[in-house]
Amino acid sequence: MSAEAVLTRNPGKTRDAGGDRAFRLLAGGCALLVLFSLAGAAASMAWGGRLAFQTFGWKFLISTDWDAVNHQFGALVPIIGTVVTAALAMLMAVPVSFGIALFLTEVAPAWMRAPVASAVELLAGIPSIIYGMWGLFVFVPFMAAHVDPWVDAHLGALPLIGMFFQGPPLGLGMLTAGIVLAIMVIPFISSVMREVFLTVPSRLKESAYALGATTWEVAWDIVLPYTRQAVIGGIFLGLGRALGETMAVTFVLGNAHQLTASLLLPGNSIAATIANEFTEADSEIYRSSLIALGFLLFVVTFVVLVIARLMLRQLDRKAGRT
Amino acid sequence: MFAKQSSTTVKPSKSRTFSFMTPSFKARLATFAMAAALGVTAHAADITGAGSTFVYPVLSKWSAAYSAQTGNHINYQSIGSGGGIAQIKAGTVDFGASDKPLSESELQQAGLGQFPVVIGGIVPVINVAGLAPGQLKLDGAALAKIYLGDIKSWNDPAIAALNPGVNLPDGRITVVHRSDGSGTTFNFTDYLSKVDPQWKTKVGEGTSVQWPVGVGGKGNEGVSAYVKQIKGSIGYVEYAYALQNKMSYALLRNSSGKYVQPNLDSFAAAAATADWAHAKDFNLVMTNAAGADAFPIAATTWVIMYKHPKNAANSKVAFDFFKWSLEHGQPQAQALDYVPLPASLVARVENYWKTEFKL
């Protein structure tokens, strides 16, 4: 307020008010452009998918059918595949990214920090098709030979949760897709985390160290609470990529429209289904169902974001009370 | 220092591309002006086509050879059969190409005609330890039961009965299919529908179907990669992929009870013995062909064109191109492991042009 008053009182600066307004319009326009394109994309996909929604109604969400011959389509298998692979990826990527960021800001010797940080960022620049090829030709055989048999033999025998880990050693499947996705999103999450960890004032950290806190205590009780909002923003960036990733997932997921509990069996994801089938979708309802899938990916991402925001607000409230 | 270095490297390259661009652009302008001045007498027509990815390699070979001779260019976009049909119906291209024939009523409605241009084969490829290429014998029913998930292991009695004396391993079968919509899948599932009533009612035929079991690989290369990696797997790919990747394959029993090797001769035999005489508009999928030496899963691609085209001049060139390809394009086709149409079929196609199209 007072700064504005000073500006308006100064006759030499009055012309800048116009510049400010223009700048505000420009910046606001940029922000609105995002909103418009988001709304436009969502609306055009809902419009393109209207035939599928009209034909199948709510059944589209709960049906496991995907039969182009008899024109029966349902989105349950790709939705579950998308959510499960992204969840697996986040389960692995978030702790590892936290470790990377922590190491690079608190633990690593100074000469090591910059090179390793740029190496991590370089990973983010690798195109997803490369991850897909690597996944298919290197990682899938490795999973088939070493990981899948072990998982099947040891975890598959457990009561209750055993059903999630039983299956033939194909190498392809939800677990492989989750791991490849985790590797792909780690650079995104960890570089955001590293950036924001650097913004924590050293005064805070040094005070904590002076009180005898360990590095872990400083990270967990000082650095993380201070940067929580931004860290969660970084996690969402990774989650968004994991939910929408197409090429790499297509190569390692197995692309089978079958609903299975086991993580070792092939499944399908929304993005992979669209990429695979769009070119040869030879009937109206087929194409419409694929576009409707795209709309559902929007919805899934939106729902996940809303749930996370609500959880965050809950956390904030708790923190405020105690 | 870094900034200075980068600025010195950028500048010359910029000016170089600029000076390089101008003359070539001028030259292009000049040829364009010349072509415009020559008008109708100039033979530099640009024909556009779109559709099937299966036919793309041979079409591009043919168009290169053809344009070297005539100066006419054929621009073909391999966007998939579905896209090709949509584009020709929208009238944005001079011809479409599809791995799946259009029905008589669909052709009539849009005023289109179609004819086959080249033949290929689809081969069941396997990865089973201890079996040499061509050692495993399957019939249509067994192949359908494998893809239905009813036959689960390689030493199943149904497979053993077809392979007396062969030591079949006791391994689980992993089925590999295409994950993307494809003409290869259409021909493969069409064959299974013809030979197995259960497949026809449960799954049916199409460019993509609801597979009861198995994993899906993207493209021929995806299926070959999966089959090579997964022990005990079976898949289906275009002949050229099986050949180039040196994959092990199974023999199939054809409709006259003979096990035939997949090769250009057996595909040609399928094309020659298929019942074209009774197929209006060549609406015939030649799987399970009748000939004694015919390979059971042979496939073709149809070119689709307007009977009364809006751009008659372009259509005329397109017909000239396909006439040249069918009559003189055999070496290019064979070099890419396609089968040229047999002479009897070429005669039939040329007759169809005369009677159906206004040239």
Image: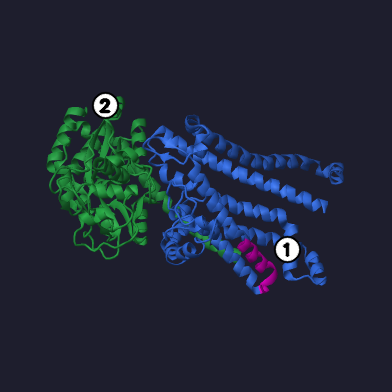
Residue occupying the point 52% across, 45% down: A79
Residue B83: percent from left, percent from top: 37, 38
| Residue bearing mark 1 | A220
**Left or right of A131 in this view: B356:** left
**Left or right of A123 in this view: B185:** left
Residue occupying the point 33% across, 52% down: B220
Helix, strand or loop at mark 2: loop
Q: Which mark is residue B96?
A: none
Q: Main secondary structure of the magenta part?
A: helix
Of B346 and A293, the residue lying toward us? A293
Q: Quadrant of residue A187?
A: bottom right
| Residue bearing mark 2 | B308
Residue B123: percent from left, percent from top: 26, 52
The magenta span reads A95-110
Of B192 and B163, the residue lying toward us? B163
Chain given the colour blue = A
User: In the image, is residue B63 above or below residue B231?
Assistant: above
User: In the image, is residue A113 above or below residue A166?
Assistant: below
Chain given the colour green = B
Pointer 2 with pointer 1, Cβ within 8 A:
no
